[in-house]
Amino acid sequence: MGMKHKVYLDHSGQFYSCKRCETHLVPRKELVSKNFHGRHGYAYLFNKLYNVYDGPPEPRSMLTGEHIVCDQYCIGCGTVLGWKYIKAFAETETYKESKCILEMKIVSKHIF
């Protein structure tokens, strides 16, 4: 696997970064919903994350039903930041497919 290059986000608004290494992860404009709960408490749903790599897909039983997900890791330090929904089996949950959960306890919020 080749070396991954970090993407630096525009500082003209809010963005979130890894709390451990400050790698930029996602601008606020990618936010879909704040109404989620992760392994460590509050979690937000985003359209996509930057500077992450995916773990292997796996079935996971969640409060909203069965899903295929993959954990997402920070490219800077390897911290598990959340997960990406690959497949939702309930029709009411398919809007989550290809979107990412970011655990708020693991990130820092920046406002410029």
Image (tube, rainbow, N blue to C red):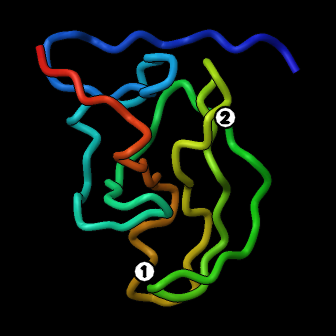
In front: label 2 or label 1: 2
Question: What kind of residue is marked 1?
Answer: Glu
Q: Does residue 3 appear to the left or right of 35 in the view shown? A: right
Q: Residue furthest right?
A: 1
Element carrying mark 2: strand
Q: Does residue 3 appear to the left or right of 32 in the view shown? A: right
Residue plotted at (21% across, 10% down): 11
In the rendered view, would you say 26 is above or below 84? above
In the rendered view, would you say 71 is above or below 9? below
Residue plotted at (74% across, 47% down): 55
Query: In which quadrant will I find the N terminus?
Result: top right
The alpha-carbon separation of the residues under discs 2 and 1 comes to 23 Å
Query: In which quadrant will I find the C terminus?
Result: top left
Q: Which residue is mark 1?
A: 93
Residue plotted at (83% across, 14% down): 2
> How many marks are shown on the rendered structure?
2
In the rendered view, would you say 18 is above or below 100? above
Question: What kind of residue is marked 2?
Answer: Tyr
Residue 53, disc: 2
From the top left corner, tell me how far across and down residue 57 is, in percent.
75, 60
